[in-house]
Amino acid sequence: MSASTVADIARPAAGIPGDGQRGQRPRKPLRVARAVVWAVVTLVVVAAFWGVDISWDALWQLPQKLAHYLGLMFLPPAWEKLPDALSATMLSVAMAWFGTVIGVIVSFPLSLLATRGLTPAVVRWPLRAVFAVLRAVPEVVIAVLMLSVTGLTAYTGALAIAIGSIGTLGKWGYESFESVDRGAIEAATASGGSRVQIMRWGVWPNAKPDVLAFWLYRFEINVRASAILGLIGAGGIGKMLVDNIQFRVWDVVGMLMIVVIVVTMIIDQLSGLVRHRIISGHWELPVVTAVRRRSARRARAESTELKATE
């Protein structure tokens, strides 16, 4: 058999789609679809730039103006106002803590009632709808709606944070309860436990780390929200910040920004550390663990001495 005959046999017949042709057929539609997607994304970006009416001159001058105001704010900051700033910061943290605690107290039983497998749908779905509505409304809008009832006070901001927390914590709660291993629930059910006992011994012990971590994370969010609510007059560091911005006292504004950043970072780090210990199963703080271990060693030593004397 000649080399040309072997080449003719190896060459695919004309008109019969080979493996290479079958692999190449989808490439053209794929390229077209990709081009269409990029064209749509480009049009959306252009429409967004057009819709916000960007001033290119102002954008070009932004670095120079930003450097000017940063110099006014931080060269140097007004540290003599630091005691007032710390007092306002504590008020913001108190607002966040109050809102988180109220949100936990209200959302916890409601999230149990909204859990699939624990309650019927006629109870579950209305509660989930309430959680969805509360999550859809920002805390600032809630505070504005409550101004006519409670007035322009820190209490208004705290209640707005609490209402917003109920929606978020309620959703996180029933999702955590539904992710629990069904074996624990089935074991509690098979032993003849009531619904309360099933929740107490089958659901809560397994979902506890995640739920507690969510509570702490929501507190972090509420600390930032309390500063924002202060911008509408709800008190705290936000109100002090907006007052000094309106009067253009930039050195005080710079000092307040430093305080907000530092306090937020400290709270984030502490909350993150506690959440990590909760999720990893190490519930106790290091000091408590050290005291407990010392007590255990002392008890073992006393037991050893007692056995030796006997």
Image: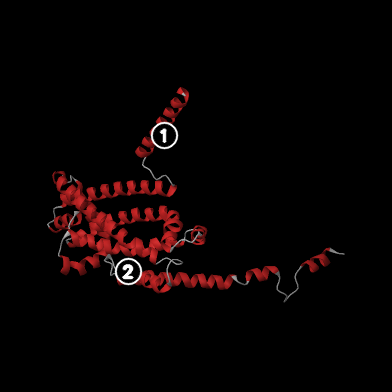
Foreground residue among 144 and 277: 277
Q: Give SS at disc 2.
A: helix
Q: Give SS at disc 1.
A: helix
- Residue 306, quarter of the rendered image: top left
Give the image location of residue 58, x and y in percent: 24, 62
Image height of 50 relative to 297, above or below: below
The residue type indicated by label 1 comes to: Ala
Q: Is residue 82 left or right of residue 136?
A: left
* Residue at image mark 1: 296
The residue type indicated by label 2 comes to: Ala
Foreground label between 2 and 1: 1
Give the image location of residue 124, x and y in percent: 40, 70
- As drawn, which residue projects farthest toward the left? 247
* Residue at image mark 2: 136
Mark 2 or mark 1: name the one nearer the start of the chain.
2
Q: Quadrant of the N terminus?
A: bottom right
- Kindly check if marks 2 and 1 are in contact, taking CB atoms under 8 A apart as contact: no
Foreground residue among 286 and 181: 181
Foreground residue among 78 and 169: 169
Residue at 39% across / 72% down in the picture?
Answer: 123
Res. 29 visible in picture: yes
Res. 68 visible in picture: no
Q: Is residue 38 left or right of residue 17?
A: left
Image height of 136 relative to 238, above or below: below
Foreground residue among 181 and 120: 120
Determine the CA span between mark 2 and mark 1: 51 Å
Residue at 41% across / 28% down in the picture?
Answer: 302
Q: Is residue 238 left or right of residue 278?
A: left
Image height of 172 relative to 273, above or below: below
